[in-house]
Image (cartoon, rainbow, N blue to C red):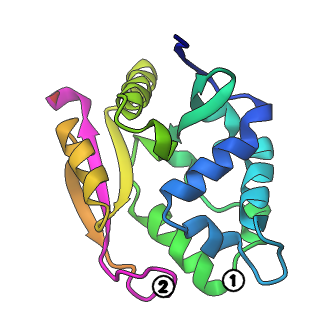
Amino acid sequence: MEKFLIREGRLSDCADIARLINQSAQGAGDYLFGQEKLKPGGAEKIMSDLLSREVHYSFANTIVMDLANKVIGIALSFPSSGLMINENVKQYYSEQQFQYIQYFVDNKLTDSWHLDAICVNSDCRGMGIGQRLLDSVKQQAAYYNFPTLEVFVFATNVRAIKFYKRNQFVISREIDVANHEFLTDKGPLVLMRFDFERN
């Protein structure tokens, strides 16, 4: 029986990381990077390129769950101070897309470890992989002495909210993103937090 291997992300993982991030973001990647001029899959190609070059939004800040040399789950996290829009990324956004990203930047917690994305292949869910990835992210945040771990979740993603609540996250605030047409449900974006001192 093959065993799961949890490891640091590699440059060669960028395409797989981008694919899983786009899945977990419920199409936000397609919205942010899927301009008409791009071919199908163009959003993930841009995300993969950014993951290979960026300091924070990077393969180097990704924990990978590997099964038989196949990436089946990822968790991308970094200090919340790294949640920003630099010129390298800004070139891809229209004004409305930029506003969407600004919601995250404006609502991040100060001095927090930011969980940007966590996702497991659909055919590998229910095996405890997401839990192992989250536990590893918590260990990272604690190692670097961050008092809080934060994550943004769509309010309609009930499964994810239950998962984080089971792991002692609480809802810190709700952010109205209803004016963005790519969201089919106009519910809010939820900022959840895990406080190490309380847990």
Which mark is on residue 58? none
Residue shown at 55%/68% (left/top)?
A: 28
Is 4 displayed left or right of 127 in the figure?
A: right
Is 53 displayed left or right of 132 in the figure?
A: right
Specify the amino acid type for callout 1.
Ser
Q: In which quarter of the image is the C terminus?
A: top left
**x, y (%) of residue 64?**
58, 29
The secondary element bearing badge 2 is classed as loop
Label total for image: 2
Residue shown at 61%/65% (left/top)?
A: 29
Closer-to-camera residue (40/83): 40
Between disc 2 and disc 1, the foreground one is 2
**x, y (%) of residue 117?**
50, 47
Is 120 displayed left or right of 37 in the figure?
A: left
The secondary element bearing badge 1 is classed as loop
Q: Quadrant of residue 63?
A: top right
Residue shown at 58%/48% (left/top)?
A: 20
- Name the residue beneath numbered marker 1: 94
Cα gap from disc 2 to disc 1, whole angstroms: 12 Å
Q: In which quarter of the image is residue 101?
A: bottom right
Mark with earlier residue (2, 1)? 1
In the displayed structure, would residue 178 be above or below residue 154? below
In the displayed structure, would residue 139 be above or below residue 121? above
Instruction: Give the magenta-colored segment's residue range.
Output: 178-198
Q: How crowded is mark 1: few (under 14 residues within 10 Å), some or many (20 or more)?
A: few
| Magenta stretch encompasses residue 189 | yes
In the orientation shown, which residue stands out farthest toward the left? 198
Closer-to-camera residue (153/171): 153
Which mark is on residue 180? 2
| Magenta stretch encompasses residue 8 | no
Residue 109 visible at all = no
